[in-house]
Image (cartoon, rainbow, N blue to C red):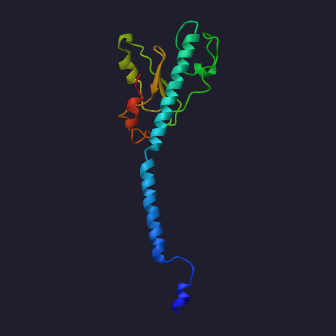
Amino acid sequence: MLSKLRNRKGFTLVELLIVIVILGILAAIVIARFAGATKESKESNLKGNLRTIRSSLEMYKANSKSNSYPANLDDLWKGTNVDVDSKTFLERIPIDPFYRSKDVYLATAIFSPIDLATERDANITGAGGWAYDSLTGRVCANYFSTDTSAGVPLDTSWGAAYNIW
């Protein structure tokens, strides 16, 4: 009878539990290692989008007859402004990867040209997308760290580096 038990094919319960525990440990190591990869990839995407928009703004200004930036970012891709010979500088406005928004908020200082930074920063709402100053041609992530409204990521520490003009 003992020989019949030894000839059976398969795994015992203890062997299966050991394999499951080993796989669980390996999964925990892999998940912990790549947990921050999502945030890092979004930051990289955001930096690339900012570079693309900023270089398109400079190309627009270089092609502009009045040597000025567009009144809004839509002029970069809609080709509606008669001030430039070349009509399209962007295929479309890139999406902010953190907020999943491509909205553009005008943050041009209107009241006091001497203190532009204070007025621009007051127009950064935290609603996602981009903040744009048509006077200086600067664009940044539309981010404000004290905003706690719905839709804002729980970890907003990423934004400090990307809402700099």
Q: Is residue 21 depicted above or below 10 in this figure?
A: above
Q: Quadrant of residue 70?
A: top right
Between residues 161 and 99, which one lies in front from this camera angle? 161
Marker count (numbered): 0
Name the quadrant containing residue 9.
Answer: bottom right
Question: Where is the C terminus found, in terms of image quarters?
Answer: top left
**Residue 115 pos. (x, y %):** 35, 14
Q: Residue at x 40, y 42 (%)?
A: 154
Residue that lies at the very extreme toward the bottom in this rendered image: 1
Q: Position of residue 35 (x, y in %)?
A: 44, 48
Q: Residue furthest top?
A: 66
Residue 117 seen from this side: yes
Residue 106 x/y as whole percent: 48, 21
> Is residue 151 shown above or below 32?
above
Q: Nearer the viewer, residue 83 or 54?
A: 54
Instruction: Name the residue located 53 percent from the left edge and 18 percent from the top edge.
Output: 57
- Residue drawn 45% across and 71% down? 17
Q: Where's residue 31, x and y in %?
A: 45, 52
Q: Residue at x 45, y 39 (%)?
A: 40
- Please, is residue 14 above or below residue 65 in the view? below
- Can the viewer see residue 70 in this picture? no
